[in-house]
Amino acid sequence: METPEPFVLPEDALEETFIASSGPGGQNVNKVATAVQLRCDVFKLGLAPPVYRRLKELAGSRMTSDGEIVITARTHRSQDANRQEARARLAELIGKAHIRKPKRIKTKVSRAAKAKRLEGKKQRGAIKQGRGRISLD
């Protein structure tokens, strides 16, 4: 499968808020809001309907009913690093939505394969038929 190329995010579709983060950082965690919550309005991206459907499926619970994708990044200790991570994750998600899965080509079972399967079923049935009670006639 192809690797998705990074999608360029338009600034007017994004909204960032910085929130207090948990995890490593000591006293810094209590003072600085380093975690970022990135909201992207999907309708402002101008995606094609099939791409939008795939994006909705990939985003799952990260997509709100208003058509916004919410990504929270809090792994780094600095705002800028979390901001870059959130944007990269969003661009990767949108890039993956642009990749179309190849259609499955239906195959037909050959006549020989059908005959072999039926022969096996007949043999198995004969074995089971011989397991019944023995009649003393």
Image (spheres, rainbow, N blue to C red):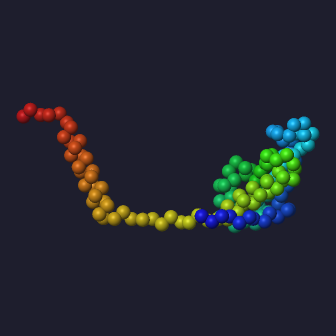
| Numbered circles on residues, count | 0
Quadrant (top left, top right, bottom left, bottom right) of the N terminus: bottom right
Quadrant (top left, top right, bottom left, bottom right) of the C terminus: top left
Residue 12's image quarter?
bottom right
Q: Is residue 15 left or right of residue 110?
A: right
Q: Residue furthest right?
A: 31
Residue at 89%, 44% in the rendered image = 33
Residue at 71%, 58% in the rendered image = 93
Picture coordinates of residue 131, whole percent (x, y): 21, 37
Answer above or below: position of 74 versus 135: below
Residue 43's image quarter?
bottom right
Q: Residue furthest left?
A: 137
Answer above or below: position of 33 versus 85: above
Q: Is residue 14 left or right of residue 135?
A: right
| Residue 115 visible from this viewpoint | yes
Picture coordinates of residue 115, whole percent (x, y): 27, 60
Residue at 12%, 34% in the rendered image = 135
Answer above or below: position of 24 versus 123: above
| Residue 51 visible from this viewpoint | no
Residue at 79%, 53% in the rendered image = 86
Residue 108's image quarter?
bottom left
Picture coordinates of residue 133, whole percent (x, y): 17, 33
State the residue in front, 134 or 26: 26
Picture coordinates of residue 136, whole percent (x, y): 9, 32
